[in-house]
Structures are given as structure tokens and as C-alpha cells.
Image (spheres, helix red, strand yellow):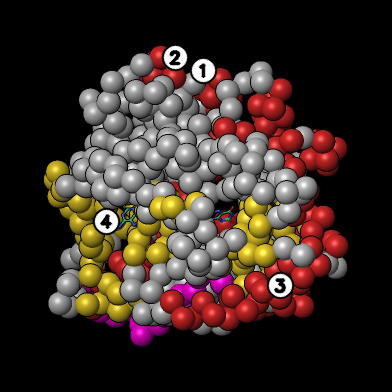
């Protein structure tokens, strides 16, 4: 949780006593210091670990967007909800007094069980940036499959802990291709507005955008887009914009303007702990147990499901194994987490009646990154807010929507940086590997070529208009494209295929998927608003008809 400072505690207005259950805090692992630590201690929850042998009405696996929506709405309907989360609680400051590490100084908090960082931008001026770190249950997982690295958030709040907070509702004309079996009219009238309200989505004050140094990089991005005839669109975010203006004025501690992103945000971002999870906690019906990883779900004799859970220590070792019984289980472990679990459970006979669609329809939301080298007379600014606020829309013309992203290094780089979301048609499949006991994903690096071609529809033209070139120093030596990764995994248990049209898994009653695994590979924009809206739609139906 991010209730780290007195300011935060006040802003949250939330007592988390009894909400966080278990062993998630770093207490004992670090020396606590300063006011942030005192605040964290004051807000510390009553520790009540999930008991081995417990019997619960509803278990939610994972505490990201899908899981948080499910927990809140089930609790509001009077159901007691048990959430388990494999990552940490993120409620305790480190020795620097901060809960989260800065982007420019990754440490033990930054990566999930790695001894060396795996930064998305791996190089600068050709020099490698990665460094050794102590192995720890850190916040950002760079999960490596054969042909792609999938970045994911780990901890209470899931991806909301690490992401840029760009809260984008897709254009309605694109929705039919995103979720073909879902009624678009209902989504745009009810569930997208509900999701945006629940997430606290808001747009930057346009006057402030035009004048602040922190968005010079975005204004340069806009100018270059428009001079090449591309529309630049403002994109909402879940950052507290008033707080950011105070950061700029120097009256509050900085997070966006201190370049915080990827490894957590200490102050201004409204991640799920401040929105859906705070409301879930306030019902008094939801507990979340961090550092607990679900490993098996299988029908129990007499009804419901037996769920096996590993309790982890902060080095990732299994400290205990627990077995509980749950009447209903909601898979909300994210596209990769849910797909891996279901693929393994189908293959090893724990859930043999799952259908043949399990593991299929996985996509990377067409993610590809690149940088452009600007002229010396066109600087992008030494101060760059880590929170993106605009994009270049060439979806209809060239199949790409490019987020004008920050490069918050603290120095003038003369670089423009972009994360493009493209209409890449390739889809991969998860399969169980009996030799390793793991789950593989058959994505190939070469499958990014359509994304590169689509992104070039924007940047080749901008480079030609501006007389500029691509940066070749950010992803290796002489490498233009960041084509080795995604931030936006989607699919693997697709709505209407592996599940019915509301996320009920075929083959078993009382088992549901409620996260990004439902979405078949692409949302045309950044995905979490769509994941949230779909979860709102599905849980409303489930509460009305299944409980
Ligand atoms: P997610 O939020 O990943 O939550 C799943 C949770 O389940 C995680 O907390 C896991 O630790 C936990 N888990 C997994 N397996 C288990 C298990 N076996 N037992 C217990 N717990 C488990 O899933 N999206 C946007 O829309 N806008 C952005 O600006 C944006 N920026 C991003 C930047 C970065 C660096 C990254 C990595 C992602 C970004 N995303 C962004 C993507 C977004 O965060 C992602 O689509 C959502 O978080 C996915 O939501 P889910 O509920 O599917």
C-alpha cells in the first residue's frame, strides 16, 4: 500500500486495519527511518495470516484491476472476499524513507526475484544500464519467454503500482475488433464511465500543460506530430494533477516530477490502493494476503474448490504451503498469471474439463518502442514528468497509436521517446512443458515486424519532415526498435471462447476469469480502462445471476 506519509494517510482517509492480512510487509528486513516509516507503522494492519484449512465463499487470485473490481462488487453484494496476492503489500518504507525506489536508482525493491536489473531501456548512448541488485520480491517482473519479455507489476495493486497511469478509452469505432461478443452500446453508456469514475481518471489542465517545463517533451512531440499531419490527442491519466502542479511549485514531495515510474510511485498516482482497493477495504468484507501465490485449484469433494497456496518469503522461497476451500474462485492473476495457471491445471489433471481454448489468443497489444534524435535547437527538457499525457493517433491510417512517452533521465537528451500500440495481428499460445514443469509461450521476436512497419508509418514521416533520425542507442548498440518486450499482455483465456460471454470458465461452475486474459490480444490503446470496464460488466452479471 502507498499510505506511506502523513500526507498520504490523510489523503487516503482510509483505515487499512484488518484489510491487509498476512506477511506482506518488509518489517524486519529493513531499518525503518523517518516520518514515512512512522506513518506506515501508525497505519499498520492487524496481522492475521490466511489460515491453512480455511473455508471461504469467494477467493480472488491477484489484486490488479480485474481482481480489485471483483472484490469491491462482491463485497458490496454482501459476500466476504479473500484476495491472495503473490507480491508484497508495499506499505513499508525502505531505509531511504520511501516505499518505492526511483527509476534512475533501481535497488532491491525494483525487480521481482532477479539478481540483475532488466530495464526496458537497456542502454544509453550505447552503454548498458543494467546492474546487480539483491534478489528480492520486488515490484516489477520482467518475465522472460522465448521471444518476448513481459513486464508486469507485482504487489497489492498489480500493474497499477508500476504503470504510467494512462487511462484511455478506445474509440468506439474500434471496439468491435477489441471485444467482438460484447455489446458496445452498453460498454460506452455504462461500464466505461463506471470504470473511469472508479479509477479517478482525469485530464491535465491544458493551460498548465502549455506552460510547465515538465511537459516540454510532450509539446515537442505534439509539434512534430502536427507538422507531419498527424493528430495529437490528449490522454487522461489517473495521476492527481493538482498534486503534480504542487510538485512543480515545490510545495509537496515529488514523484512524477522526480521521474518515478516503473518501480512504483511514492505520492501522486492514484493506483488501485487509493481507488478500488480502498473502497473494497471500507466495506469491511475484504481481506488481502500478500506474498501468497496460488499454485493449484481443483474441485473439492462435496462442492467448491480446493486451492493450494505457497506463502513466500521476500527472497521468493516457499515459507509454508496452505490449502483452503473456496466456494467460488476468480482468476485475476493477469493475462500471463491466469493463462499459466489454467494451462497447467488443465494439463496436470487438476481441471481437466477446461476447454481447448485455454492458453490461446495471447497478444502483446502491438507494443513497440523507439526514440528519435532531435536537433540541438529543439530540446525536450531536462525535467520530464514521468506521467505521459498525449499520443499520436494514426490507428486508422497506419495501424499505430503512439504514446509520447517521457525519458526522465534528469538531463537534456534531445530525444523524443515513444511507446507505440499497433494493430499487430499475431497471436501466441501458452502450452504446458512436461520437461520443465513450466508453461511456455510461443511468441517469436520476428512477429513484431508488423508493429515496426506500423510504427514507421508515423516516425518515418516525422523524421523526413523534421530532418531527424532514429536513436540507435537505447535498446543496445545500433538498435532502433524496442521489439523485445511488452507492457500490455492480453488474452490466454479469451471471453466467449475459454469462458462464456461473462467470464465463466467452461467446464466448471463457480470458476471465473476477470482480468486481461479475457481480451484477445489488443485494445488499440493502453488497456487498463478496458480491463476495468469489462470486469465491471461481468461482475455485475455474475452478482445478479450466480450468487
Ligand atoms: P494485473 O494488474 O497484472 O494484476 C495481476 C496480479 O496477480 C498481480 O499483482 C500479480 O502479482 C498477481 N498474481 C499473478 N499470479 C498470481 C498467483 N499465482 N497467485 C497470486 N497472485 C498472483 O492484471 N496500461 C494502461 O492502460 N496504461 C498505462 O499507462 C500502462 N502503463 C504500463 C507501464 C508498465 C511498465 C507496465 C508493466 C504496464 C503498463 N500498463 C498500462 C498495463 C497495465 O498495467 C496492465 O494491463 C494491467 O495491470 C493488467 O490488469 P490485470 O487485472 O489483468
Relative depth, front residue between 173 and 351: 173
Which numbered marker is on residue 294? 4
Label 3, label 2: how far apart the Cα atoms are? 50 Å
Would the CB of label 4 be found within 8 Å of ligand 1?
yes
What's drawn in magenta, residue-wise? 349-366
To which residue does mark 3 refer?
Answer: 460
Estimate how packed mark 4 is, as few (under 14), some (14 to 19) or many (20 or more) residues with alpha carbons within 10 Å. many
To which residue does mark 2 refer?
Answer: 35
Q: Quadrant of residue 374?
A: bottom right
Q: Residue at x 20, y 56 (%)?
A: 308
Relative depth, front residue between 374 and 121: 374
Residue 235 position within the rendered picture, expressed as x and y whole percent measured from the top left: 72, 53
Label 2, label 4: how far apart the Cα atoms are? 35 Å
Q: Are marks 1 and 2 in contact (CB under 8 Å)?
A: yes
Label 1, label 3: how far apart the Cα atoms are? 49 Å
Q: Residue at x 52, y 59 (%)?
A: 473
Amino acid at each position: 500500500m502507498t499510505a506511506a506519509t502523513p500526507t498520504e494517510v490523510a489523503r487516503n482517509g482510509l483505515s487499512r486495519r484488518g484489510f491487509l492480512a498476512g506477511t506482506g510487509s518488509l518489517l524486519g528486513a529493513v531499518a525503518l527511518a523517518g516520518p514515512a516509516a512512522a506513518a506506515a507503522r501508525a497505519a499498520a494492519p492487524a496481522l492475521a495470516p490466511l489460515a491453512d484449512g480455511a473455508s471461504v465463499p469467494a477467493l480472488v487470485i491477484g489484486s490488479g484491476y480485474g481482481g480489485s473490481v471483483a472484490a469491491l462488487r462482491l463485497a458490496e453484494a454482501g459476500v466476504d472476499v479473500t484476495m491472495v496476492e503473490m507480491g508484497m503489500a508495499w506499505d513499508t518504507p525502505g531505509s531511504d524513507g520511501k516505499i518505492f525506489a526511483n527509476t534512475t536508482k533501481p535497488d532491491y525493491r525494483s525487480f521481482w526475484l532477479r539478481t540483475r536489473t532488466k530495464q526496458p531501456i537497456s542502454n544509453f548512448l550505447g552503454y548498458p544500464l543494467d546492474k546487480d541488485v539483491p534478489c528480492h520480491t520486488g515490484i516489477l517482473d520482467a518475465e522472460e519467454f522465448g521471444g518476448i519479455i513481459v513486464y508486469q507489476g507485482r504487489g497489492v495493486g498489480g500493474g497499477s503500482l508500476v504503470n504510467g497511469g494512462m487511462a484511455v478509452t478506445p474509440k468506439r469505432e474500434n471496439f468491435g475488433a477489441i471485444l467482438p461478443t460484447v455489446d458496445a452500446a452498453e460498454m460506452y453508456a455504462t461500464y466505461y464511465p463506471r470504470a473511469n469514475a472508479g479509477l479517478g481518471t482525469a485530464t491535465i489542465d491544458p493551460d498548465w500543460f502549455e506552460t510547465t517545463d515538465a511537459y516540454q517533451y510532450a509539446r515537442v512531440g505534439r509539434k512534430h506530430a502536427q507538422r507531419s499531419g498527424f493528430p495529437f490527442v490528449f490522454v487522461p491519466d489517473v495521476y492527481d494533477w493538482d498534486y503534480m502542479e504542487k510538485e512543480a511549485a515545490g510545495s509537496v514531495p515529488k514523484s512524477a516530477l522526480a521521474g518515478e515510474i516503473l518501480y512504483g510511485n511514492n505520492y501522486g498516482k492514484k493506483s488501485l490502493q487509493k481507488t478500488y482497493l480502498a473502497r473494497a477495504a471500507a466495506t469491511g468484507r475484504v481481506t488481502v494476503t500478500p506474498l501468497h501465490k496460488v499454485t493449484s485449484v481443483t474441485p473439492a469433494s462435496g462442492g467448491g474448490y480446493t486451492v493450494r497456496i505457497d506463502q513466500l518469503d521476500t527472497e521468493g522461497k516457499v515459507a509454508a504451503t496452505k490449502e483452503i476451500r473456496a466456494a467460488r474462485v476468480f482468476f485475476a492473476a493477469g493475462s500471463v498469471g491466469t493463462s499459466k495457471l489454467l494451462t497447467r491445471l488443465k494439463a496436470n489433471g487438476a481441471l481437466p474439463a477446461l476447454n481447448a481454448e485455454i492458453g490461446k489468443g495471447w497478444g502483446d497489444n502491438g507494443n513497440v518502442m523507439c526514440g528519435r534524435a532531435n536537433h540541438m535547437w529543439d530540446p525536450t527538457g531536462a525535467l520530464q514528468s514521468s506521467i505521459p499525457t498525449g499520443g499520436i493517433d494514426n490507428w486508422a491510417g497506419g495501424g499505430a497509436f503512439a504514446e509520447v512517452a517521457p525519458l526522465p533521465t534528469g538531463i537534456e537528451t534531445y530525444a523524443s521517446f515513444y511507446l507505440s500500440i499497433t494493430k499487430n495481428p499475431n497471436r501466441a499460445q501458452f502450452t504446458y512443458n512436461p520437461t520443465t514443469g513450466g508453461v511456455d509461450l510461443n511468441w517469436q521476436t520476428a512477429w513484431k515486424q508488423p508493429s515496426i512497419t506500423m510504427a514507421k508509418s508515423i516516425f518515418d514521416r516525422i523524421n523526413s519532415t523534421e530532418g531527424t533520425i532514429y536513436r540507435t542507442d537505447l535498446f543496445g548498440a545500433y538498435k532502433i526498435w524496442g521489439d523485445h518486450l511488452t507492457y500490455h499482455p492480453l488474452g490466454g483465456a479469451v471471453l466467449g471462447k475459454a469462458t462464456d460471454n461473462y467470464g465463466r470458465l467452461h467446464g466448471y461452475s463457480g470458476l471465473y476469469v476477470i482480468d486481461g486474459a479475457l481480451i484477445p490480444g489488443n485494445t488499440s490503446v493502453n488497456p487498463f480502462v478496458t480491463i476495468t470496464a469489462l470486469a465491471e460488466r461481468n461482475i455485475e452479471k455474475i452478482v445478479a445471476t450466480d450468487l
